[in-house]
Amino acid sequence: MRILRSPAAAAGLLAAAFAVYYATCSLLIHESFHSNGWDLGIFDQVVWNTAHGRFFEYSFRDISYAGDHWQPALLLLVPAKWAGFGPQALLAVQATALAAAAIPLFLAVRRLAEPRIGLAFALAYLLSLGVACAVSFDFHTEAFAPGLAFTGLWCLATGRRALFAAAVLPILALKEDAAILVLALCWIAWLRFSWRREAAALAGISAAYGAIVTLVLMPHFRGADLNPLRERYGYLGDSVPEIAWTMVSRPNLVVDQLARWQAVEGVLLVLLAGALLPLAAPKLLPALAPLVALPLLSQEAGQGALNLHYLLIPSTVSLTIAAIAVGGDHVETLARRASMVRGGFTAPRLRRIEAGALVATALIAFAVKSPLPPSFAAEPGRFEIDGHASNARSLVRMIPAGAVVSAQSPFVPHLSEREKIYQFPRLLDAEYVLLDRLGPIPAEDLAAGYYRCWAALPRLGFDLVRARDGISLWRRTRPSEAVPDVPVSCSGQHP
């Protein structure tokens, strides 16, 4: 077929095929009850509450969600709730956004090098660990970042200065720390493409926006009761200025955190996302450094190892720099040096070799470490809708719409479209409790007294309604007794 001979058509077909693949994987994970309260349940409840006039309200913490994370981009998903779509819509949108990002990447590399190399970059991105891990772990607004970043790269490659700002500035709406990604793209625009005026203006806007969000807006919505920064960077401080000062005054803490094997492995995975090609553009590496270092400095396990969705943004920038390196002058230099030793090496040939190495690296990394099938690391049970999942769904359906529920993590995304949904053992004023002896229990829930709260349910006024296949549904039928040996959040009283 002639259409398959066109790299542009092939890139489009690849993006469409991977969109279906990503959506299928994420929907199977959800329908088999392997999605999580943190984070699919949170996002779905926040969007659902916002669609019903309770802007950025959620019941996972005693603060506004805007005090936990600043993500105005979630407003774009509100129409899906008005139309009656559930959390599956978030997963489908994410899959489409991640796959569609391959198109501007192809277009950018086609201009920087040639169409077939652009197709190789698109395939390497679609197979990348960063994307696979993001698809495997619920929904996150960072999924929109690769498409915007690669569109920015296409604007740089084609000289579209006005469109560059239009592509890059929306990244700021994705998350409170998204300004770092914008600054990275501004660094690339300044040093590689000499867009000094545009880069300086966008960098100034991004820095100001990031400062206002992190120093003013989020503290306002968060209040003094809870501090998510302490959870991630408590060993460095409780606020952005204090954390920054500690990093300067006590660099040994930073060195110790970054010297962990998990951190070293994370750095290697980021560089391998670009097949080590970013090392050929050393002046651009400072754009990548903060995107890698700041997550690795977190004491939260997933973030501090660039697991889950945290690999997506650094690997996106790594691939962006790799694209610039392939289209850069170092290829001509290598070709000249290689031709002195052995004839036949030309710049186009070396570019194709580098593109082939990029695809091969992506394929090997996917086969070894991808959480999506087919790979050695994928867990088949996460994608199987078995009898246990069917029993879970039947018990979920027994809970009335609008009832206040406390549920184990995998149930939360299936019950999140209500004003109040808690992740057990957070109980408070819950009317129903849904638990699963066979299901996964997050470590933080175990530490919060999961089993003590479960054992105390009868004394807290709950009776067993139905038990099936290790899954138990409880309903509050009487006033709670005083139970001093359980956490406050489980006692039925607000802390």
Image (cartoon, grey):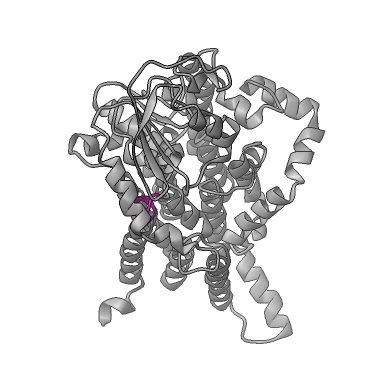
Write the residue at 54% across / 45% down: 310
Write the residue at 30% across / 25% down: 419
In front of the other: 116 or 45: 45
31 in magenta: yes
Q: How many marks?
A: 0
Judged left or right of residue 97, residue 157 is right
Q: Is residue 280 above or below residue 408?
A: below
In front of the other: 283 or 50: 50
Q: Quadrant of residue 230?
A: top right
Write the residue at 32% across / 26% down: 404
Type of secondary structure dominating the magenta stretch? helix
Measured as percent of width and height from the top left, residue 270 is found at 61, 54
Quadrant where the N terminus is found in the figure: bottom left
Furthest toward the bottom, the residue is: 343
Measured as percent of width and height from the top left, residue 147 is found at 40, 50
Judged left or right of residue 119, residue 455 is right
Measured as percent of width and height from the top left, residue 72 is found at 37, 30
Which residues make up the magenta segment? 28-33
89 in magenta: no
In front of the other: 333 or 465: 465
Judged left or right of residue 273, residue 21 is left
Measured as percent of width and height from the top left, residue 283 is found at 66, 50
Q: Quadrant of residue 118?
A: bottom left
Q: Confirm whether residue 89 shows in the render.
A: no
Q: Confirm whether residue 278 shows in the render.
A: yes
